[in-house]
Structure formats: C-alpha cells, structure tokens
C-alpha cells in the first residue's frame, strides 16, 4: 500500500503554535475522553462515567440560564414567538430592534452593536460609582474575554524580546498565547500562604531579572478574582500593582471575568479602572469581561467585551480598532447576551415586579448555591490528609496543594511524568474524576497542586464526589508511605 504524501507536516507549521500548550484540555482531559469512549464500548472501569471537573463550564453541570435573558434572545432569533412572551420581554426586544432590527444574522459594526456598548458603559459607571463614564469608542465586543486578550497580545507583542508578567499559578490561555506570539513569559509568584497574594517585592524582583536577561517587560497580567487560585485582590493590592505598572511604564491587562463570583462577606470586587481613576496615575489598562462565568454562565455563546480603561495614544487606539475590523465583528448572539448580562430588568425600564423578582430570585439561587459549593469543596479538601487549600474567595475553582510522598514522586519520574500529572491520571483511572495538574498552570518549584471546578450540581452529587476524592487520595497515598 502506498504511503500517503501530505503537503504539510508539523515541521511546516509555525513552531510557536506547535510549542504552545493548553493544560485545561491537555493530557488528562484527552485521556478522560478516551476512557469515556471505552466505557461506551463496554470496557469496565471502577466507575460508570467520567466527571469533568477540569473546565468551568456551568451549563454542562446543570446550571440553568437566566430565563429573562433567554426569552429575549429567543425572540430576537425568532420574532414569530414574540407575541407569546411577557410584556417585559417584548419591551426589551423592541428596545433592541429599534436600534438594530431583527437582523442579528447580519454583521454588526466591527466593535459591536452601539446599543450594547452603551449599556456596558452605563454598567461600568454604575459598578465603579464614578463620575466618569466610558466612551463607547473605548469598548469593543469580543467572542469571550479570550478573544480580546488574544487580540491585544498579538497587537502589543512585537518580537521575541518582549515579555509578559503573568501570575503564577496562571490561566493557561496566557502562557499559550504568549508562546504563539513568540514572546517571553515573566512569572511572578503569588504567595500561597498569604491567600495567593501578589507581593511588591516579587514584582520588582521578576521585573529586574527579566531586564537583566535582555527581556523587555511590556504587559502585567492581573487576574481578579483569581483563576485558578480564587483569591480576591483588595484595594491596597490593586493600588500596588497600578503604581508598579505606572513606574515601570508597562501596560496592565485586568482579567475581571469572575467579578460576580465573590463568596466571602469581607471581600468585594474592585475594578482596576476604578482604582486607576482614583490614583490619577499615567498607566495604560485594558480590562476584560465575559458572559461565560458570573451568574450568566453562557460559555458557548461566546460573548464579552474589552474596555480601553485609560487614555492611550490615538494612533494605538486606531490600530486596535483596525485590528478588530479584520475579524469583521464578534458573533451577534454573544453581543446581545453581553448586553443582557449588564442590563437586568428594572422598574425604570418599566418592568413588572413579577419579572424583576423572578430575575433576582434566579440570580440569588445560583449565587448562593455557588457560595455553598465553594465552602463544601474548601472544607473537604482541608479535611483530607496531605491536602491543603486556601479559602475559595471567588471564581469557580479550587487549587489545592498536595503533599506527595517521595516514593510516589520517584515512581512518577520513572514514568517520565511530572508527579502531579501522574497523580491526576491515577485519580482519573480509578475514580473517573477529571482534574488539571498544577504544572499546567505553573506553580512554585517543589510544590504540587491540581485545579478542580466547584460547579457540580446538584450539591448532593458534589458531596458524593468529594467523599470519593478524599477516600481515594488517602488510600492511594498510603501505598507509597
């Protein structure tokens, strides 16, 4: 049989893309997918199905979408059902249609629908309680926060001497896209023992180390609330990072997609924009938000926005908008859901008490359930011998530290695998639980972690899975004592 000759081989592909890694969908999840197919084919495992704890994907776990949002969106997609909707839904649909018509299958302006960008500007001003309202020209609608982040990395990173300061642990999108851009990662380690805090001394040390190695730090990435760590930065921490960026003349990327997901009473979300305005420092900030998380949880609709939160060079501003036009526009369904996320039904709009109460109740039920699930996961992890977890203050994940016996570490290295990767593979093959090794997020040398989501529903199922984890971990590690 003749060997097929392909025109393109891996060596012909951009090496930066070949080298990029994305742990959230890496070795462990791909192994899980194979196991699931084997189970369907009749192969026996100690469990009936895979439990995917590797991705923050709320609706796969049964989180219900907000009914008002979906009713408006459905009516925009199919005007024939509008007459069957409530007056409040009809009013919101009319508001959108007065601006864009029933034309969501058509391209929008490249930055997105002006009616949605205006709603976002109002939302930001109200959220930050500031006199200054963003211009809609500083707001671009994107296919999720990831698209905006990727756009700005490609625009700002010009060669392999440019560097990006990323928090460690980090969300793997950052390391992957930095690699694709051919730029350099500059890690700054969050201090686990201090609730994953960002320390001024660490920022300074890593900045100076990069400069001494001939790397030009261009961007400081700040994830608040943290992914995968779940910490929430306070005012002092944000001020510190803004002052640092201003002094060093580097750009801030404020990843704020989990701003609604804060579960502890003594913490609240404070935007980098708000603090920058208060400090009145010369610093360039780009902030990112998304419909994927929060209470909205509409990951697959791919909606979000990027805000140019401070004054930038007009020529740079032009290049940002020009770069956005290359992709024509973000998907219009995601744009509308972004508008719905930032514009709940209100009395001022003319909505009934019933609509408002139902909307608020749905949001309240989702949030308080997430709050309880964060507490359940934190407690079980800390009650497990050899496992410790900082309190899950925000976001949707736990990032526990695991103490691995020396014999297990040697066993893993003999298999040419990172110890936390081996640990996660063993957990998968014996329990069906899919978690992501901490090495995929990067971690302080000599420590081992994994990331898991808290999204399992119903809560009784989450309790069952945490009991399975606890028993497995203590039994499995005992084999290597």
Image: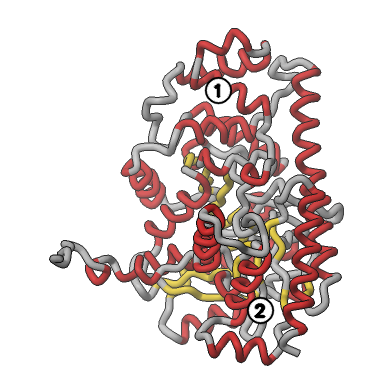
Q: Is residue 4 left or right of residue 316?
A: left
Asked where in the image residue 4 lies, by quadrant, the reply is bottom left
Which of the image's four quarters has the C terminus?
Answer: bottom right
Report how far apart the C-alphas of labels 1 and 2 lie in the structure: 45 Å
Q: Secondary structure at mark 1?
A: helix
Q: Residue furthest top?
A: 83
**Residue placed most toward the observer, 71 or 235:** 71
- Write the residue at 73% across / 78% down: 476
Q: Which mark is residue 74?
A: 1
Q: Secondary structure at mark 2?
A: loop
- Write the residue at 50% across / 17% down: 78
Task: Give x and y (percent) for residue 151.
Answer: 41, 53
**Residue placed most toward the observer, 13 or 220:** 13
Residue denoted by label 2: 448
**Residue placed most toward the observer, 152 or 132:** 152
Q: Is residue 63 visible?
A: yes
Task: Give x and y (percent) for residue 82.
Answer: 57, 12
Task: Give x and y (percent) for residue 329.
Answer: 39, 37
- Write the residue at 81% across / 56% down: 463
- Write the residue at 56% across / 33% down: 337
Which of the image's four quarters has the N terminus?
Answer: bottom left
Asked where in the image residue 442 lies, by quadrant, the reply is bottom right
Q: Is disc 2 surrounded by few (<14), some (14 to 19) or many (20+) residues within 10 Å?
A: many
């Amino acid at each position: 049989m003749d060997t097929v000759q392909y025109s393109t081989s891996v060596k012909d592909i951009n090496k930066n893309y070949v080298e990029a890694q994305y742990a959230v969908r890496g070795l462990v999840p791909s192994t899980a997918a194979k196991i699931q197919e084997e189970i369907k084919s009749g192969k026996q495992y100690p469990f009936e199905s895979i439990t995917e704890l590797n991705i923050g994907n709320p609706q796969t776990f049964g989180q219900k979408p907000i009914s008002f949002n979906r009713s408006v969106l459905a009516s925009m997609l199919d005007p024939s059902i509008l007459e069957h909707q409530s007056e409040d839904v009809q009013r919101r649909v009319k508001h959108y249609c007065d601006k864009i018509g029933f034309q969501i299958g058509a391209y929008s302006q490249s930055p997105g629908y002006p009616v949605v960008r205006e709603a976002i500007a109002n939302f930001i001003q109200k959220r930050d309680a500031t006199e200054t309202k963003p211009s809609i020209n500083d707001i671009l609608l994107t296919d999720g926060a990831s698209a905006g982040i990727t756009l700005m990395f490609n625009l700002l990173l010009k060669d392999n001497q440019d560097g990006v300061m990323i928090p460690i642990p980090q969300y793997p999108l950052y390391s992957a896209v930095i690699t694709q851009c051919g730029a350099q990662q500059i890690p700054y380690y969050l201090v686990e023992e201090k609730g994953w805090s960002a320390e001024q001394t660490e920022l300074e040390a890593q900045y100076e180390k990069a400069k001494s190695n001939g790397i030009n730090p261009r961007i400081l990435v700040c994830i608040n609330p943290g992914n995968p760590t779940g910490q929430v930065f306070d005012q002092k921490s944000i001020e510190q990072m803004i002052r640092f960026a201003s002094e060093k003349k580097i750009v801030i990327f404020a990843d704020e997609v989990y701003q609604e997901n804060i579960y502890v009473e003594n913490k609240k979300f404070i935007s980098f924009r708000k603090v920058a305005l208060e400090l009145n420092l010369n610093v360039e900030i780009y902030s990112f938000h998304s419909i994927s998380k929060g209470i909205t949880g509409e990951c697959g609709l791919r909606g979000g926005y990027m805000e140019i939160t401070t004054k930038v060079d007009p020529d740079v501003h032009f290049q940002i908008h020009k770069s956005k036009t290359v992709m024509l526009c973000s998907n219009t369904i995601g744009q509308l859901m972004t508008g719905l996320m930032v514009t709940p039904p209100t009395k001022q709009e003319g909505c009934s008490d019933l609509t408002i109460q139902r909307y608020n109740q749905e949001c309240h039920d989702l949030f308080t359930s997430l709050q309880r699930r964060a507490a359940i996961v934190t407690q079980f992890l800390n009650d497990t011998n050899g496992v410790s977890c900082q309190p899950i203050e925000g976001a949707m994940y736990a990032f526990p530290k695991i103490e691995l016996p020396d014999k297990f570490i040697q066993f893993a290295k003999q298999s040419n695998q990172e110890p936390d990767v081996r640990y996660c593979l063993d957990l998968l093959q014996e329990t069906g639980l899919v978690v992501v090794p901490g090495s995929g997020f990067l971690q302080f040398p000599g420590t081992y972690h994994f990331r898991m989501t808290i999204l399992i529903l119903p809560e009784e199922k989450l309790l069952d899975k945490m009991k399975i984890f606890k028993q497995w971990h203590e039994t499995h590690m005992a084999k290597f004592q």
